[in-house]
Image (cartoon, rainbow, N blue to C red):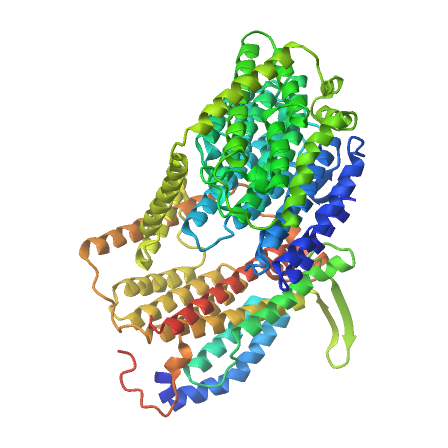
């Protein structure tokens, strides 16, 4: 089934691309089909997933496989990813005016993201997870950069890609370390690990989590990503992609339960992000930015709960994960509708929308109250579970967790109240364009889902419990309680609501200027700094001077060969085996010296040819006719090539500065001497006997040829030859491309 | 260029071409049992082409076409054993008795070598084109006074 669903997405991509040529709307509505089918399947499996595994093994020995697993958590995540996805596609078809440009790229990227995210939540192997993880980063980059002519948008897209993509690399390293200590790349049967490697792995995985789920200090990309069209913000940057980090943290929790750094760093990251995100949301004036900072805060709460890691905390985290996806997506959809219908997202300019946009207000209030944790909504029971989880701890951990959760929740209530009141409450009536049902309906459906979920807790509970039990089997004793009665947690909840409302009401009255994005600027500056340094380093290293390259290569080879000199003794020097070798060597040396001192370029080419031909004579004397033949042919062609090439150049060499000439002489002489002695040493100290007999036998028996060299090239080591000819073709194409460039730019040489 | 102005060089290269071509073919087919092989054969063909180029004689033009053909042959030879369930690049030896030639033995290494030859020839043509060899040769009628400045 998993293959079918992924295939449906791939087919959907092709059909969407075709439909995009007709119109943006047609493409977006077509694109909704594959996620809708997936959502239907996932919902039918909720709470009762088969746990089926679908896999294609590529390299068995390294356990490299594309492996998916439909367990309860994965299925629930798939229901969110594809369900919200399908609604967002419908919404987007209303969001974009029918004449929108880039009608192919946007829907295809969005569906591509949907497919990647589905793959990510179903992934069951380290490799699969990583591939889809990075795919979501790339599609996110394309979607954030939708308005590709706006420099601010470009910077935001680049920042998002660099941070999430870079975090992906840390994640890969962490997952590989984890897989190594676990002995399996599978993510479903992780055993607890400990030790230094485990700590390093935990920190690397947490880096991946923090980059993807926008935790301090990597959160700076998320507010910038609000430059994306609102459907993208609703889908990627609130409901799904930013949850990837949370999902990853949840999935790897069983492995890191014994790692102290996992808990400590996760807790600090989570609480800091929860509080700083809440403060940020209170300071912003752009409705989308308020929600984005709120997302940072909520994700911080999830990271905190997962870092605490008690069964109850994990249970609460899963409940909040689902509730958050519903209410935050709704709020974004409503803000998008406001943006389209009023032309602004600035809460200071908005007001009175409860009269002019009643349905949007209804959806926003339902979602907002769920976010604030007010009954009778899903957000309330989930928040209640989180407070219960904090109360269930002991000692300092209890105090810290409870304090952070309560403080974070007060801020959440405050920014929710401020947002709802200033936007929808009484104020200057904003002019409003007519309603677009394609936008209103999905928002209403998602907003109502929070209420429906609360009413039908009997249906929701098994889903959350089974999903949480995939992470910690002990979590299945808990359940969400609709009305707990006057217990401690409930009292705390009420206190949070009251305190938060007061803070929110105060903040709503104050019209403060929006803060400057200091973190984002710093991130951009450091990125630019890296690029500047990279350019400088490249200019230094790749200066384009052929003699310097050659001197570098020769110098390095000399240093490498010098290692052999430690075991050199004069016995290793054999002057010659046959007298002809002496004759050839003398000829070769004369030619080489002549080449070094001759002034004309043609002369140098000819002396080099003589060196090569003498060299092939030496090969022949050593009994390597194949080598000699090839060398001879190469020399012939090289000389002709020189003759052709020299036609473009001066007849004589340019004069060289004396110091540079001396350096070259020193490198040449040292290099020649060192390599000669090193080769003599190496030849006198073989590490074993050459397998000549085995090669000869195999050559005749399986290769059917008597020329061992050729049988090795075309049969035994044919794959190497294959690789080499690929290199030859690449080089030839490069030469042709360079030649074409020269013709096009019209410059000679 | 010198070669275009010298009838002796042109005639010699023209006369040597078929001989060299036969040598190349010999190396290609003999390679499995004697010195030679696809690479050496490609170099011989390449040498003729290089010489013909500087002499302003006709020679094959399409580097990319020849290389693509070679690459295709190599890929097909490499992948063909997979179809019948053998490993990549598995060697099949065939022997047959033909009229005139008698018993010959060859194998899938031969097409592989032919592909390598084509790629080497293509590379050399690309090199000559890259160096602008044809421009240098120029039309034989042009008095090439001071072409090498």
Q: Decide if residue B93 is in sight here.
A: yes
**Figure check: A618 above or below A410:** below
**Can you say which quadrant of the picture contains the C terminus of chain A?**
bottom left
- Residue lying furthest left: A658
Q: Residue at x 39, y 81 (%)?
A: B135
Q: Residue at x 33, y 59 (%)?
A: A546
**Can you say which quadrant of the picture contains the N terminus of chain A?**
top right
Q: Residue at x 60, y 16 (%)?
A: A494
- Residue lying furthest top: A395
Percent of width and height locating residue A138: 55, 47
For the residue pair A134 and A93, the one nearer the viewer reads as A93
In the shown orientation, is residue A156 left or right of residue A361? left
**Figure check: A549 above or below A176:** below
Question: Residue A409 sits in which quadrant?
Answer: top right
Percent of width and height locating residue A451: 70, 30
For the residue pair A665 and A433, the one nearer the viewer reads as A433
For the residue pair A54 and A498, the one nearer the viewer reads as A498
Percent of width and height locating residue A568: 39, 40
**Figure check: A558 above or below A222:** below
Q: Residue at x 61, y 43 (%)?
A: A131
For the residue pair A86 and A453, the one nearer the viewer reads as A453
Question: Residue A601 sits in which quadrant?
Answer: bottom left
Question: Residue A614 sits in which quadrant?
Answer: bottom left
Percent of width and height locating residue A401: 55, 15
Q: Decide if residue A119 is in sight here.
A: no
- Residue lying furthest bottom: B141
Looking at the image, how many numbered discs can be counted on the residues? Answer: 0
């Amino acid at each position: 089934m998993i293959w079918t669903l992924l295939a449906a997405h791939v087919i959907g991509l092709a059909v969407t691309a075709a439909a995009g040529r007709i119109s943006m709307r047609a493409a977006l509505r077509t694109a909704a089909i594959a996620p809708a089918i997936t959502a239907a399947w996932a919902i039918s499996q909720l709470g009762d997933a088969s746990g089926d595994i679908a896999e294609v093994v590529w390299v068995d020995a390294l356990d490299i496989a594309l492996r998916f697993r439909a367990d309860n958590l994965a299925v629930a995540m798939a229901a969110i990813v594809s369900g919200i996805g399908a609604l967002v596609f419908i919404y987007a078809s209303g969001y974009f005016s029918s004449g929108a440009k880039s009608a192919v790229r946007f829907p295809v990227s969005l569906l591509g993201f949907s497919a990647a995210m589905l793959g990510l939540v179903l992934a069951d192997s380290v490799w699969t997870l990583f591939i889809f993880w990075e795919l979501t980063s790339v599609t996110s980059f394309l979607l954030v950069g939708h308005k590709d002519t706006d420099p601010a948008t470009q910077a935001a897209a680049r920042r998002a890609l660099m941070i999430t993509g870079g975090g992906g690399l840390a994640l890969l390293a962490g997952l590989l370390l984890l897989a190594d200590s676990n002995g399996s790349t599978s993510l479903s049967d992780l055993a607890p690990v400990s030790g230094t490697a485990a700590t390093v792995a935990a920190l690397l995985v947490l880096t991946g989590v923090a980059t993807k789920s926008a935790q301090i200090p990597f959160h700076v990309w998320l507010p910038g990503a609000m430059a994306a069209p609102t459907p993208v913000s609703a889908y990627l940057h609130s409901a799904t992609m930013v949850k990837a980090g949370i999902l990853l943290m949840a999935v790897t929790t069983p492995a890191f339960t014994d790692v102290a750094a996992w808990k400590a760093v996760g807790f600090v990251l989570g609480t800091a992000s929860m509080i700083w995100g809440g403060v940020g949301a209170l300071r912003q004036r752009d409705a989308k930015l308020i929600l984005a900072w709120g997302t940072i805060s909520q994700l911080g709460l999830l990271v905190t709960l997962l870092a605490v890691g008690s069964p109850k905390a994990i249970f609460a985290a899963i409940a909040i994960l689902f509730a958050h996806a519903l209410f935050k997506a709704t709020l974004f959809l409503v803000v998008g509708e406001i943006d389209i219908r009023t032309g602004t997202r600035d809460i200071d300019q908005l007001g009175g929308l409860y009269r002019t946009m009643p349905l949007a207000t209804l959806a926003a209030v339902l979602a907002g109250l769920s976010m604030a944790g007010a009954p009778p909504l899903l957000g309330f029971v989930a928040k209640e579970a989180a407070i219960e989880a904090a109360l269930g701890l002991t000692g300092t951990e209890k105090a810290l967790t409870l304090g952070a959760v309560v403080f974070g929740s007060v801020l959440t209530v405050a920014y929710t109240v401020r947002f709802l009141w200033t936007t929808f409450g009484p104020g200057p009536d904003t002019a409003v364009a007519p309603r677009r049902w394609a936008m209103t309906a999905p928002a209403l459906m998602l907003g109502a889902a929070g209420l429906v979920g609360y009413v039908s807790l009997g249906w929701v509970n098994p889903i959350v419990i089974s999903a949480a039990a995939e992470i910690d089997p002990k979590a299945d004793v808990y359940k969400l309680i609709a009305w707990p009665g006057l217990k401690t947690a409930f009292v705390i909840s009420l206190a949070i609501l009251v305190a938060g409302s007061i803070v929110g009401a105060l903040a709503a009255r104050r019209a403060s200027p929006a803060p400057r994005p200091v973190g984002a600027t710093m991130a951009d500056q450091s990125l630019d700094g890296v690029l500047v340094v990279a350019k400088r380093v490249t200019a230094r290293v790749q200066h384009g001077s052929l003699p310097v390259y050659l001197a570098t290569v020769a110098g390095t080879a000399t240093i490498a060969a010098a290692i052999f000199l430690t075991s050199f003794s004069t016995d290793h020097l054999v002057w010659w085996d046959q007298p002809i070798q002496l004759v050839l060597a003398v000829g070769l040396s004369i030619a080489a010296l002549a080449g070094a001192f001759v002034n004309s370029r043609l002369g140098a080419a000819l002396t080099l040819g003589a060196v090569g031909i003498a060299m092939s004579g030496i090969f022949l004397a050593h009994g390597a006719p194949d080598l000699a033949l090839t060398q001879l042919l190469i020399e012939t062609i090289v000389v002709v090539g020189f003759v052709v090439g020299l036609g473009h150049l001066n007849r004589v060499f340019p004069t060289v500065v004396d110091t540079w000439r001396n350096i070259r002489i020193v490198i040449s002489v040292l290099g020649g001497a060192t390599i000669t002695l090193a080769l003599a040493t190496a030849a006198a100290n073989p590490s074993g006997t050459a397998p000549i007999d085995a090669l000869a036998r195999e050559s005749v028996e399986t290769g059917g040829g008597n020329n061992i060299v050729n049988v090795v090239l075309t049969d035994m080591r044919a794959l190497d030859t294959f690789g080499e000819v690929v290199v030859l073709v690449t080089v030839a194409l490069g030469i042709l491309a360079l030649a074409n460039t020269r013709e096009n730019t019209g410059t000679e040489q | 260029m010198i070669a275009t102005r010298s009838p002796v060089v042109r005639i010699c290269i023209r006369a040597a071409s078929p001989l060299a071509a036969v040598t190349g073919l010999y190396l290609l087919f003999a390679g499995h049992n004697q010195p030679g092989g696809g690479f050496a054969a490609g170099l011989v063909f390449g040498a003729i082409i290089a010489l013909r180029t500087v002499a302003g004689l006709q020679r094959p033009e399409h580097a990319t076409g020849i290389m693509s053909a070679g690459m295709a042959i190599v890929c097909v030879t490499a992948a063909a054993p997979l179809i019948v369930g053998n490993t990549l690049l598995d060697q099949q030896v065939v022997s047959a008795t033909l009229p005139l030639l008698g018993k010959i033995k060859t194998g899938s290494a031969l097409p592989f070598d032919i592909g390598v030859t084509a790629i080497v020839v293509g590379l050399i043509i690309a090199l000559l084109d890259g160096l602008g060899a044809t421009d240098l040769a120029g039309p034989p009628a042009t008095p090439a006074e001071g072409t090498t400045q």
